[in-house]
Amino acid sequence: MPFYYMLIVMSRGRFHIIRSEIRGVEAVAADSAHTFGRHIHGQFGIGVILRGAQKSLSGRGVVEAEAGDVITVNPDEVHDGSPIGDHGRSWQMLYFDPAVFIKPIHALTDGRDNMAELSHPAIKDPVSAKLFLNLYRAITDKNGGDSEIQFHENLLILLARLIELASCEHKNAVPKNIVKAQSRIDDDPSVAVTLDELANIAGISQFQLIRGFSKFTGLTPHAYLVQRRLQRARIMIATGEALSNIAHVCGFADQSHMTRLFVSAYGMTPGNYAAAQH
């Protein structure tokens, strides 16, 4: 199976981005002491800590994960990550576009879950860790002649184990007024918006907006706006668009502004990420 492998060396560690012909799946291997700021992905993520330990805040609480633990993240779930100790940590991660991930979840649950969600951000289960590493090898092994069938087989086995440990749950309902304000940002995050405008849309005070937004998204309205802009930038970078134009279109002050925020969120520059996509 043709595949792509790129090593990004940064001052705080190494990031390996591995792409395969399994559409909608991205593999990352990292060894880093980088502290990631709060950010979101548009994908499901499952991984394993290989060395060291980290602490992270997610929509499901503050957790610590150490070597051997499985770590997970849901689409649009606010999270961060910092190493525990002075020597960083290493991990392997697979990111799945929702379409790739939800179909096998529904197959395993007979369609009972319309909105699949990974329930726990850190799982101490050697069996799950081993199953993940089998899946990771299936998608990154350049000599794997039957990678497509191996990938889907190992994905189903891993998900069945995770469902067995903790069934997928629905997200807590978000108040309609917060959803309205959130939708204003989601419709076009590149357009500037004020707290006053969002509060008027939600029909609440600015303080109530900030408090409600933080409670149900994990971010203030401004921080959420920035993450939506970064998500859009990440998608555009994969198309080969010029970075300066992406920064302008996505609503950043300039390319350097986008770069600072991108590194904080993803641990690599937009240029590094662009090089890994082509």
Image (tube, rainbow, N blue to C red):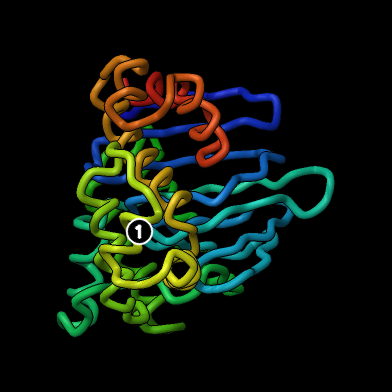
Residue found at the far right of this picture: 86
Quarter of the image that includes the N terminus: top left
Left or right of 258: which side holds 2? left
Left or right of 224: which side holds 150? left
Q: Residue at x 43, y 20 (%)?
A: 254
Q: Secondary structure at mark 1?
A: loop
**Which residue is tagged 1?**
75
Q: Position of residue 48 (x, y in %)?
A: 56, 57
Q: Residue at x 50, y 74 (%)?
A: 120
Left or right of 62: which side holds 151? left
Q: Residue at x 43, y 25 (%)?
A: 253
Quarter of the image that includes the C terminus: top left
The front one of 159 and 206 is 206
Q: Residue at x 34, y 53 (%)?
A: 43
Give the mark count. Answer: 1
On screen, 238 above or below 225?
A: above
Q: Position of residue 191 (x, y in %)?
A: 27, 38
Q: Quadrant of residue 116?
A: bottom left
Q: Is residue 233 visible?
A: yes
Q: Position of residue 34 (x, y in %)?
A: 67, 39
On screen, 245 above or below 158?
A: above
Q: Position of residue 238 (x, y in %)?
A: 29, 28
Question: Which three-letter amino acid code belongs to the residue tagged 1?
Answer: Pro
The front one of 255 and 79 is 255
Left or right of 43: which side holds 22? left
| Within-10-Å neighbours for mark 1: few <14, some 14–19, many 20+ | some
The front one of 227 and 56 is 227
On screen, 80 above or below 27?
A: below
Q: Is residue 138 visible?
A: no
Q: Quadrant of residue 21?
A: top left
The front one of 11 and 61 is 61
